[in-house]
Image (cartoon, coloured by chain):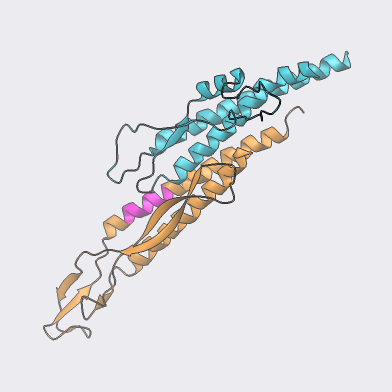
Chain colours: A cyan, B orange
Amino acid sequence: MNWIDNSLNIHAAALMKRSERAEIIASNVANSDTPGFKARDMDFKMEMSRLMQGAGRLATSHAGHMEMDVTQSSNLLYRVPTQPSENGNTVEGEAEQAAFTENAIRYQAGIHFLSSKVKGLKLALRGE
Amino acid sequence: MSLMNVFTLSQSALVAQTTRLNFVAENLANAEVAAGSPETVYRAKYPVFRSFINDELSDSSAKGVRVEGVYEDETVPRKLFDPGHPLADDTGFVYLSNVNTVDEMANMMEASRSYQTNVEMMNTAKQLLMRTLTLGQ
């Protein structure tokens, strides 16, 4: 059922990436008072295009080659603070909270898209 | 599912912030405790936070936080001339703890704000997971 896979795939992948990002931001917020902690985040657009193009997947041109999928692990970047703090911590609570909320909204949007897709498919199958 | 890990991470922060609040309470409770010598007097205590990779989250590199240790404030305790005090030394001085109540209040507010933020994150993560569970219905 390749067509089902194709139509759901991108949104499902986006949800996975979104939840991964939520985890990273949660880690930042948890460490908002840890001296020397460096806040991290991912470039969502870059990660998605990496996933879609399959970049990072090694070509298997020989029967003895093993498939290696490095698209799963995200490329984490360090956040640049607007106001560096004395103890080396680069977490800015408000910025992190804003990023988390934005991420949550986009996650919900993803769920919405996925829901509509499922509804559409159901309708097509039933044919009523 | 990474969203589940949000709970583990936020929970580690809740525990750490609670420990910090406990230290604030202990410091404030002992703010006016007197002693006969500068060595035995109560000194303000603070937790040391350190991030660590949680073994429960085997598939991720996200770090939680934990209290790694405690350090005592090394500032000189307050010295008060009070010859009538039962704990006064030979020269008539008593020593009071070096707890700074204003610092402690600020510390307390910061801890409670961090706690709130983490609880909010857990709530949001919960909402997202619940919506994911009802997907396609």
Say whether residue B44 is left or right of residue A52: left
| Rendered view: B57 above or below B99 | above
Q: Is residue A111 visible?
A: no
Q: What is the number of callouts on the image?
A: 0
Answer with the quarter of the image where residue B31 lies.
bottom left
Is residue A8 at all visible to an observer of this figure? yes
Residue at x 39%, y 49% (from the top left corner): A34
Q: Does B73 sit above or below residue A46?
A: below
The image position of residue B95, as x and y in percent, is: 20, 75
Horizontal and vertical percent position of residue B66: 46, 55
What range of the chain is rendered magenta? B105-113
**Position of residue B49 measured from the top left corner of the image (x, y, whole percent):** 40, 54
Question: Residue B106 colored magenta?
Answer: yes
Relative height, residue A93 to residue B137 (above, below) = below
Is B97 rendered above or below residue A47? below
Assign the N terminus of chain B to one quadrant of the image: top right
Q: Quadrant of the C terminus of chain B?
A: top right
Can you name the residue that lies furthest to the left here?
A: B91
Q: Position of residue B103 (x, y in %)?
A: 28, 56
| Main SS, magenta residues | helix
Please report the residue visible at 35 percent of the width from the left and 43 percent of the height from the top: A89
Residue for point 73% across, 33% down: B134
**Does residue B101 belong to the magenta stretch?**
no
In this view, the residue in front, A106 or A48, is A48
State the residue in front, A84 or B134.
A84
